[in-house]
Image (cartoon, coloured by chain):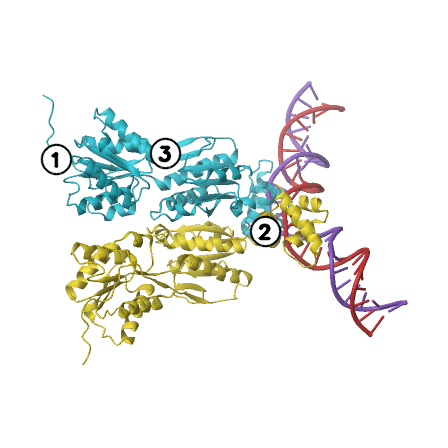
Chain colours: A cyan, B yellow, C red, D purple
Amino acid sequence: MATIKDVAKEAKVSIATVSLVVHKHNRISPETSKRVNKAIKKLNYHPSRSGRRLVSKKTGNVGFILTEDHFLRSEPFYTRIFLGTEFEARNYEYYILLTTIPSDYNEKSHLPRFILEKNIDGVIIAGKVPSYMIDQIEKYDLPIAIVDYYPPSNEYPVVLIDNTSGGITATQFLIKKNHKNIGFIAGDIDHPSIYDRFRGYKMAMDAAGIQFSESNYVVDENYTSRENGYNAAKKLLELNNDVTAIFACNDAMAIGVMQYLKEKGIAVPKDISVIGFDDVEADLSLDPPLSTVRVPKYEMGIEVMKLMAELLKDKDSTKKKILVSVELIDRGSVTVCSEKITMPA
Amino acid sequence: MATIKDVAKEAKVSIATVSLVVHKHNRISPETSKRVNKAIKKLNYHPSRSGRRLVSKKTGNVGFILTEDHFLRSEPFYTRIFLGTEFEARNYEYYILLTTIPSDYNEKSHLPRFILEKNIDGVIIAGKVPSYMIDQIEKYDLPIAIVDYYPPSNEYPVVLIDNTSGGITATQFLIKKNHKNIGFIAGDIDHPSIYDRFRGYKMAMDAAGIQFSESNYVVDENYTSRENGYNAAKKLLELNNDVTAIFACNDAMAIGVMQYLKEKGIAVPKDISVIGFDDVEADLSLDPPLSTVRVPKYEMGIEVMKLMAELLKDKDSTKKKILVSVELIDRGSVTVCSEKITMPA
DNA sequence: TAATTTCAGTTAAACGTTTAACTTATTTTA
DNA sequence: TAAAATAAGTTAAACGTTTAACTGAAATTA
């Protein structure tokens, strides 16, 4: 492996000159530059990261932290975000170091090794993490950017899903298809993402002049799983047998809803239309395939890396909050409301 | 951030002593060690990677490569392997650099950046990758270890699932419950893992003296998905209406099988027992929960990192092939065969 | 013309660590 | 008791870069 010294010797200049040429510093004459570049090519020289790192006090690495639970969730949501981040990092010549922390991170837990050993220049946090951990990281004076989580302290740049807009979009889509009696199903309603989807639903209903009815929503399940979607659908139909469409706060619950409807012999979308949120793989293998609101996971990863790149230039350069927009995907689980609409005289 | 100098000053020793203590060199007396360790704790000192790297000429990184498809598969199989690897890497003070390659990697594709920039000391390959890529990596003279893939060139250390044993275990379990008419369902039978499971099935049948019947297996689906499990179950029951148990080559197909049986009003396990292979999350939320053969994904990640650690000490130290053993998990989709067994007179 | 500025480099220190070679004091051996 | 071995450190060089400060020559300015 050729080092800067070999190049210097070959080009008959000092190592400083080589360094300056590599960094395209204009102090060096074109002729010298040419000579040095020739030597670099000849020796196939690539500056060693280690040497650079030592003097620049930069590692060229960015840490990517999420809880173990999040990483293992069956729909590879965070996996896709990670992939986007890793891809974008290439443009900035950064490497991503991925690690998980236990979901119950507490006073006794250790910070990820790459923080303790100072092997990163910045930290990307994906999804909800204990805020105690963020406090701990804060001590290391590292730039922090967050994706898919709104931390209690709002001083960080974050990338979030525009859930409210997604809620509006989904609901308006149903309304345009003449649905009025639209059920909303959720779990974990205190989660900001879920709540915002609900808010979007209400806003769209309000805007369309449709009375919001308590009997049209079930949000008391503890978690947004398939099972709870199934349960919620059951509860909803017991409350209100007239719903013509159901908006589930995510695809997992929507799948549970469809399962329940199938068992009850209720045809989707003929009898009841169903729409979800997230856009997961499984949607495609449902019958009918699930219409949903696509969350651009990969793009979120890209965006958070862009924020990180800004921070790496200047730690306090940005506190941007980015809302990534979502997109309606109509697949087949929604149709025009078949009930006769009684128009006011 | 404390450096080795700060620790040396605090403990009133030379920096060399600190280094020796950190490396647990026995040249240093217990008392001095204690003092130094106290200083290390007090200052929260962690050796800087950059400094280390420069002198050791090692990067302290290991690359982890898989295809994008594999990483995104809905059951987070490789995610778990990665987690095991990352965890084990901590013991050797290595960092894992994860990257994906396109599934159609070809002559025009680039190798991962960390190889081109020589930012790793070794490469772990997870799952099947184009062998052309392995040839390319070979040129960089890096140690290579492989997990869950048996490459055409058998010169590498690999960690594999003991599929044959798993096939035997599952089948014997059914046989012990008095099943004789046991169907086997697979897709992609040319895949070594799948084929070995089938071989295990046959071996167990042979050993029990049960005649293997062509009408007892369906392996012509192109892929081991739920849909194909559904289809295969249909085909199987058309071929042979007397099966009392079905061994599906993986859980995805088993889930499809159960779906088909449910639709046909065939009760599991009362009418037909079902067993899968892999042990995925979804098994638990089935009704009944799926009995299966657990593949220790996390442990596979640990094992491959152990192999890599050996290689990192000495590139040619090992060509070990490790078969990780699998374990029967009985959940509820298998029961004693209810058919009257006619004993030979 | 003399002083000043610009140009095109070079010198040398610094980054944080490891480790071979050395030192000094103590213990063992013959 | 003198020589040899051991124990417990220390010294200093090396790893590959970057960059502030310097230098000497040439060009510009007043």
Quarter of the image with the N terminus of chain B in it: top right
Which residue is label 1 attached to?
Answer: A338
Which amino acid, by three-letter code, is at mark 1?
Ser
Kind of element beneath mark 1: loop
- Asked if badges 2 and 1 are on one and the same chain, I answer no
Q: Residues within 10 Å of mark 2 (few under 14, many from 20)?
A: some
Query: Along the line of sight, which residue is nearer the eye, B236 or B55?
Result: B236
Which residue is label 2 attached to?
Answer: B53
Is residue B99 shown above or below B235?
above
Looking at the image, residue B242 sits to the left or right of residue B79; the answer is left
Question: Residue A225 is drawn in which quadrant?
Answer: top left
Is residue A195 shown above or below D8?
above
Chain to which mark 3 belongs: A
Which residue is label 3 attached to?
Answer: A192
Which amino acid, by three-letter code, is at mark 2?
Arg
- Asked if badges 2 and 3 are on one and the same chain, I answer no
Q: Nearer the viewer, mark 2 or mark 1?
A: 1
Q: Residues within 10 Å of mark 3 (few under 14, many from 20)?
A: few
Mark closer to the chain start, 3 or 1: 3
Chain to which mark 2 belongs: B
Query: Along the line of sight, which residue is nearer the eye, A219 or A120?
Result: A219
Looking at the image, residue A181 sits to the left or right of residue B81; the answer is left
Which residue is located at x 26 percent, y 62 percent? B334
Chain to which mark 1 belongs: A
Real-space Cα distance between discs 2 and 3?
Answer: 44 Å
Is residue A122 shown above or below B207?
above
